[in-house]
Amino acid sequence: MLNTVAVLVVQVLGRLRVWHDDREVDAGPPARRLMLGVLALNAGRLTTRRELIESLWGERPPSSAVNVLHTHTKHLRRLLDPRHSPRGQDGVLSTVGDGYLLRLPDDALDLLRFRRTVAAAQQAANRGDPARAATLYREALRLWEDDDPLCDLPALEDHPKVWGLKTERRRAQLSYWDLMLRAGNAAEIIAALAVQGAANPLDEAVQATLIRAYQATGQRAIAFERYEATRRALADELGVEPSGELRQAHRQLLEEHQNRDPPTIPRQLPAPVPDFTGRADELARLDTAHTRRPPGIAIICGTAGVGKTALAVHWAHHNRERFPDGRIHLDLRGDDAQHALSPYEALGRLLTAVGVPDHDIPVDTQSRAARWRTETDGRKLLVLLDNAATADQVRPLLPGTHDTLMLITSRDRLATLAALHGAHRIELDLLPHPDAAHLLRRLLGERAGTDPGSVDTLAAICARLPLALRLAAEYAAAQAHLPLAGVVTRLHRAGPLDLLDWGGAAAIRHVFGCSYRLLDPEAQRLFRLLSLNPAPHSTPACVAALADLDEIGAARLLHRLASAHLLRCDALGRYGFHDLLRAYATEMSLATDGDAERQAATDRLLDHYCETAVEAGDTLYPGWSGSRRHAGLALEASGVTLSPDAALSWLDSELASFGTICQFAVRQGRPERAVTLAAALHRYLEAGHGTEALSIYACAIDAARQLADPQGEAHLRTNTGVILRLLGRYAPAVEELSQALKLCRRTGNRHGQARALSNLGIIEERLGDFTSSAARHSEAIALYRDLDDPFGQAAALTNLGNLEESIGEHAEAAQHLLAAHDIFATLGERSGQAIALCNLGQIYTALGDDTLAVAKLREALDLFREIEHRDGEATALSNLGTALCRQAKFDESLCHLEQALDIFRSTRHRYGEASVLNAIGETLRALGRDSEAAQRHRLALEIAAETGDEDERGRATAALESLAEAREARPDA
């Protein structure tokens, strides 16, 4: 059964292609394709065998050439007309005399369609219908897939009919371009025309048409350059001068240039804002944007009320001499979606500004843009486009050359202008506090000089936002009967949004509302819900939980809000409001979101903090995750796996927020979240974050008492005792640990008892009560063993080993510390391993094995640094410095000890500070720098006396006595 083809299409205007219906079919090997190409070029006319043989083989055909043609013919008949027999003569391809005839309908061959459409275009032009003619020429030219017909058959490149067809296409192009230019549509064809001009540098007709197009689109300088380049090419390549058509295009350029009226010089800048303050860096960057080559475009973007227009106008006035051809100001009204200027309207106003009469302003946007480029060509203008909404609103307004500086202000970042047009973007932030206070002093006058504290407070209330600062100063002026402190009190009580909500379009609520209303509903909802997070910043993961989104969706909306400058994004990728925007977002949430939705969002936020804190703690301190279950703490992880680096990074970035979140949980009636969060942070906070820990635990202890949760309270009091001990505040630490011990004994919480006992034992060791300390540690170890809590056992063994090292029982200490290290290693508890190694190093130093001591201490130091345990790192550095001193490596010893001292002072670890000061004194003594050594020991003695630390007090006292004896024994004493 023969195949049937409903529609056959052959293409030669580009590659040779054959289609059956909508499916492209293979036309066969190169020789057969070449034969089909020649037949198609002659479609409807006889192609002789001689022409085919010459096209396939040139002047030396093979003896079998005719037979090969017969074979190709048979295959081509099957390809083109599968319904007919390959030997039939009544099909698409028939044998006629000494040749072949390819009969294809006009629609089946693109060449025939091209010629038919071009003929129709010529008829339309002849009867006076240029628009129809242009449309038909455009349709005809779109049939061409490539500039060359049969471009995939290089053997036909020089075929006369191929050259003839290329000439037909060129004539059609020139006719089409001429019609488009006469219709004022040069902008639509100039890109394609420029490509043809580059490909045909010696074609005078194409070059003349391109010059006319450049002239029509206002690019006169480029038109002159194109003429000159063509003239030189003709002279160099052909040795001739331009012909009549090219000379005529050049003559028209010259006549237009000579007949231009003197340009209008617009002077439209608004008055500069009075008392402009600060922004020195931004002004310098604007200078750079103008002086760089090419200057082009500068964008000033920032949140509502931050002073974008004030900065732009201030700079423009101070630099107006640089723009002798004029300064234009145009408000694009991008802050009002309903009344924003369209590019069409904006171009009309810009053209009017440069002196184009109304009747000469084109009626469509493209033509207006072309005329604008014409008018700005070669002119040194400053165009201040104020309040741009989007890059799409601005792009049609850009000039064609860089002589004009476009200075644009926007609440949006206008990323496309920077990416595609090389715009120089300046992000305008809130005023620095000194500049904000200085602006208030200038605005308030003498009142500011008598009460500088109120000036600083007022700057903070206004979030250092310039618009708010000016409104606040005006409000203060209207309250002249009140002292400045009274004005500040009123603003505190009523809220700045209420008292600064006047001044029409300058009111704070109005300017924020304009930005808010430009957002889509999703972004508006997120903007409102973000006000529920009391922390100063929010991560995408936090926002995803708050708004019940996936993290990718949250990041997308955050980027949208940041691009609109309703949020700020810091270097760590966290987002936050300034205080006035937070207040506005809170108002909008209270007015829009229901109580149930707000509470659900709050609960999701608190759950995120609690669950992520648990996950981070379990990742960094896996041994403790088992121990806390023995403690009966109901902590659940988020289920999101964190790497150790990600866990530590999250904890570090949120450290400043944890106390705020705990207090927020209590205020929201969720005290159990405060207890959970504080409990989950225990191991992290004791690694050098004592100041933050005390405020977190104080809030969480109150929450536990509110819940009547003695177990949670006991755990948190033990945590507090640990922190107080690390800070060297032994008396309050003992008080907290004793209360925790009582609560645990009353409730039968044996795990809690063990923790409290072990930490009390550490303090008693510091205070010199070694017997009681040993008893506490032994009791704690027994409890942990009964509970089968390996982490607790290892921690208590470490503490016992430290005690034994203090009293000289080094062998027993080493045994206990090695046992602790092995348990920690089994649990994957790197912090515990490092602590055990550090203490072992100290023991080996005391035993005189300095080489082994240094090895253990370096291993401990590496571990502490990996997990960023600051106090542990300082302890390892201190012990390492001591060991190196024993090896007489004094310079290296002092280097490590000074590093340790810096860390202990930054974390306020008082015992560690006293210990390392004594170690520094001992190293300096070994170097013979006795006066410096005595100074360090005296500082250590002061700290030990303050904390009650007998160990370091005795060490410092003994060193000072020894130094005094040595001084007295010297002959020159």
Image (cartoon, rainbow, N blue to C red):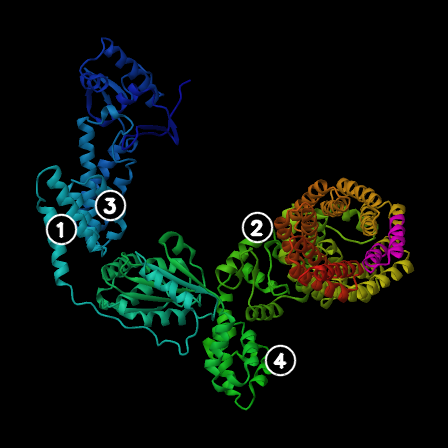
Label 3 secondary element: helix
Q: Is residue 688 left or right of residue 245?
A: right
Give the label on residue 552, or none.
2
Q: Earlier in the sequence, mark 2 or mark 4?
A: 4
Residue, disc 4: 493
Residue, disc 1: 249
Depth check: 762 or 679 in front? 762
Q: Position of residue 499 (x, y in %)?
A: 55, 80
Measure how far apart labels 2 and 1 are at the Cα level. Answer: 57 Å
Give the label on residue 194, or none.
3
Q: Is residue 768 magenta?
A: yes
Q: Position of residue 932 (x, y in %)?
A: 64, 60
**Residue type beneath disc 2:** Ile
Tell me which residue sits at (47%, 80%) in the image: 503
Measure how far apart labels 2 and 3 are at the Cα level. Answer: 43 Å
Q: Earlier in the sequence, mark 1 or mark 4?
A: 1
- Tell whether label 1 touches label 2 (CB within 8 Å): no
Quick check: 905 above or below 91? below
